[in-house]
Image (spheres, helix red, strand yellow):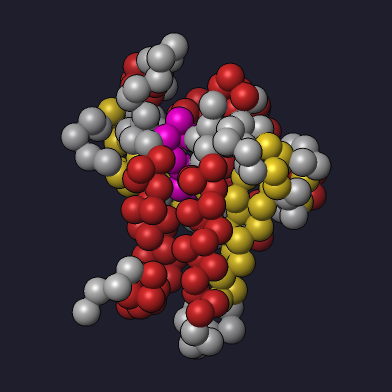
Amino acid sequence: MSSKTTKILLFLTQGFEDLEAVATLDVFGWTQYREHLPRVSVTTAGFHKVIKSRFGISITPDLLYPEINPKNYQALVLPGGFHSHGFDQAYDARIHELAAKIHQNGGYIATMCVGVLPIADAGLLTGKEATTYPHSRYHDNLGRLREAGAQVVNDRHVVMDDRIISCDGPGSSLEVVFLLMECLLGGAATKEVRRYMIYDQ
């Protein structure tokens, strides 16, 4: 096993979607189940000392925004959330800059649901395939992706283009996390983690 630790930054906004955040922490946490698996560190971060999810989770992040060094991370995970509960802060220019720096350094960006929209606003999806949550009551999310220059895909649950992963909702979050794991750790380690989590002979 390599002594190198893969570092992932999980950035959480107010009103984040619970399952999408927890899926990231849980699946990568399972890499600790066997000592020979690659080492992974997931660091939570945000703008506030306490971040509240849409459905009741409160998280004290490991880092606040000013403490983040983008060069330290091989991936950024940005879950979606509910605009009615504070997710609008995801469109902050500081998140655009953070995503751009991690991507420019060769890192991956994994988003779920509407978490892809700030990435599109950052200009990182121009001419690239992406998808997002299609059922918002008050927002045309697919239209917003198109306006940002993305090539919208609506016949796949999960899409990856140029190291940027997007999906159509919380129900696809596990698939996003396993795809990110495969990109970062390789197919063999990912298959082993899946075997421990999902009984499959």
Q: Is residue 68 left or right of residue 18?
A: right
Q: In the current view of this chain or complex, which residue is farthest to the top?
A: 138
Q: Is residue 117 left or right of residue 58?
A: left
Residue 84 image position (x, y, % from top left): 58, 19
Q: Nearer the viewer, residue 76 or 87?
A: 87
Q: Nearer the viewer, residue 95 or 128?
A: 95
Residue 179 image position (x, y, % from top left): 35, 57
Asked if residue 120 is positioned above or below residue 4 in the image, the reply reads above
How many labels sit on residues? 0
Q: Can residue 102 be seen?
A: yes
Residue 15 image position (x, y, % from top left): 61, 31
Q: Residue at x 34, y 53 (%)?
A: 175
Q: Residue at x 30, y 44 (%)?
A: 158
Q: Is residue 156 left or right of residue 168?
A: left
Q: In the current view of this chain or complex, which residue is farthest to the left?
A: 155
Asked if residue 178 is positioned above or below residue 21 in the image, the reply reads below
Q: Quadrant of the C terminus?
A: bottom left
Residue 111 part of the magenta-drawn span: yes
Asked if residue 193 is positioned above or below residue 69 in the image, the reply reads below
Q: Can residue 187 be seen?
A: no
Q: Tell me the quarter of the picture where residue 62 sits.
A: bottom right
Q: Residue at x 73, y 49 (%)?
A: 61
Q: Tell me the quarter of the picture where residue 96 sits.
A: top right
Q: Tell me the quarter of the picture where residue 126 sits.
A: top left
Q: Is residue 193 left or right of residue 85?
A: left
Residue 19 part of the magenta-drawn span: no
Q: Which residues fall within the magenta stretch?
A: 109-116
Residue 47 image position (x, y, % from top left): 74, 37
Q: Residue at x 34, y 45 (%)?
A: 172
